[in-house]
Structure formats: C-alpha cells, structure tokens
Image (cartoon, rainbow, N blue to C red):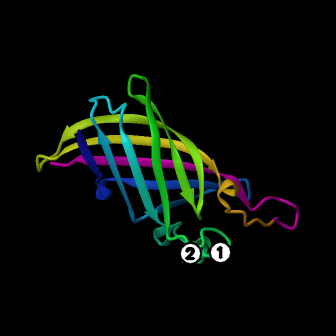
C-alpha cells in the first residue's frame, strides 16, 4: 500500500463563478491538505481525503474575500474547513478517471463527481516520487447552503449558482 501527501507548493485549488452572468471571478484556497492511499499502480483503488481552510480563500479582493468568509457565504468562524472524502476513483480510459466522493461545505455534505486526468509520475531532483493530477468539476453553491443572492436594478443575477472547480495537484509518495 502506497501513501501520498499533497505537495502544496506545486498544487493549486481554484474555482470560478460567473459575476453578473457576463464574466468570471476567479478564486483559490491558499491553505489545504490532501492524502491518497493506493495499492494499484493505476490508482483505481485510491482513497483520497482533502481539506481546505476557508479563511485562506482569495479572490484578489479583500472586501469580497471577507464577504465570502461571512455568514452570507461560508461562515468561516463556525465552519473553518471544506472537506472531501472519496468514495471511488474509476478508470474510464487512458489517463482519464471519474472521482466520486462526499464534499462538505458549511456543515452540508453532498456527493460530487469530478473528472480527473492523470498527468504522470516523475522522480524530482530530491529523489521524491511524485504523481500529478488535474481535476475539474462543477457544484451548485446553494446545495451547500451558500444561498446569498441579490439582483441588479435591471433584474440580473449578481452571482451564479454554478461554481466551476479546478485542481492542479502534485502528490508525493511517502516513504
């Protein structure tokens, strides 16, 4: 059984949400952790757990970040972490997988499905065995109690319900 830990210096946890339905606001989490345990070389039996610190959210706008941490959105004081625990990682074909698991945001747990592409394996300059993955998916923020909404004077939606997720991850095999 091989154990892996995320290489946070070479990983990004990001999201996009439509603003005014005309452009995207990009954001990320700066503090996160993940582990993976797998026996099979193709990772099809992998068990993955992930968490992100809500207070580390960044959209490159301090006022918006504070609003996201408030009770209107994540309620960071009461729910400081977002967590994910996998239920399956299924090889579709080639390097493409489907990852299923339980995502918990603001105390609400829902099943989610992410598309995963295996980027490959490599030994770095320090002799560490690393494996890379790209993960993409969508969630509906209101499913997790992130229901703050307002409309413009003309009746337009300010923030979309659909959040696009993108994770670029390097995992380090543990000795």
Cβ–Cβ under 8 Å for marks 1 and 2: yes
Quadrant of the rendered image containing residue 121: top left
Which of the two residues, 80 or 151, is positioned nearer the viewer here?
Answer: 80
Mark 1 or 2 closer to N-term?
1
Q: Main secondary structure of the magenta part?
A: strand
> Which residue matches tag 2?
78
Left or right of 72: which side holds 114?
Answer: left
Q: Secondary structure at mark 2?
A: loop
What range is drawn magenta here? 151-175
Left or right of 119: which side holds 17?
Answer: right
Which of the two residues, 29 or 98, is positioned nearer the viewer here?
Answer: 98
**In this view, 82 is above or below 41:** below
Q: Given the current orientation, which residue lies at the most extreme right position?
A: 154
Question: What percent of the width, then of the height, locates residue 69?
Answer: 57, 73
Label disc, if present, on residue 71 of the rendered structure: 1
Quadrant showing the N terminus: top left
In the image, residue 156 lies in the stretch drawn in magenta = yes
Q: Secondary structure at mark 1?
A: loop
Residue sitting at x 87%, y 61%: 155
Question: What percent of the width, then of the height, locates residue 86?
Answer: 45, 44
Question: What percent of the width, then of the height, locates residue 148?
Answer: 73, 67
Q: CA distance from mark 1 to mark 2?
A: 9 Å
Residue sitting at x 54%, y 77%: 77
**In this view, 173 is above or below 83:** above
**In this view, 107 is above or below 109:** below
Residue sitting at x 39%, y 46%: 48
Residue sitting at x 68%, y 62%: 145
């Amino acid at each position: 059984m091989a154990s892996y830990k995320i290489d946070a210096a070479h990983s990004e946890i990001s999201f996009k949400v439509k603003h005014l339905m005309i452009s995207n606001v990009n954001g990320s989490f700066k503090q996160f952790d993940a582990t993976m345990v797998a026996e099979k070389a193709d990772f099809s039996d992998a068990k993955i757990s992930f968490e992100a610190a809500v207070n580390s959210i960044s959209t490159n706008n301090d006022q918006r970040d504070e609003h996201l941490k408030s009770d209107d959105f994540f309620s960071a004081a009461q729910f400081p972490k977002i967590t994910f625990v996998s239920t399956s990682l299924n090889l579709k074909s080639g390097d493409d997988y489907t990852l299923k698991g339980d995502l918990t945001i603001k105390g609400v747990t829902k099943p989610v499905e992410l598309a995963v592409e295996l980027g490959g394996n490599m030994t770095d300059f320090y002799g560490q065995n690393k494996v890379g993955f790209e993960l993409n998916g969508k969630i509906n923020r209101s499913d997790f109690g992130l229901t703050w909404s307002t409309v413009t004077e003309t009746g337009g939606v300010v923030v979309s319900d659909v959040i696009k997720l993108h994770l670029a991850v390097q995992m380090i095999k543990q000795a």
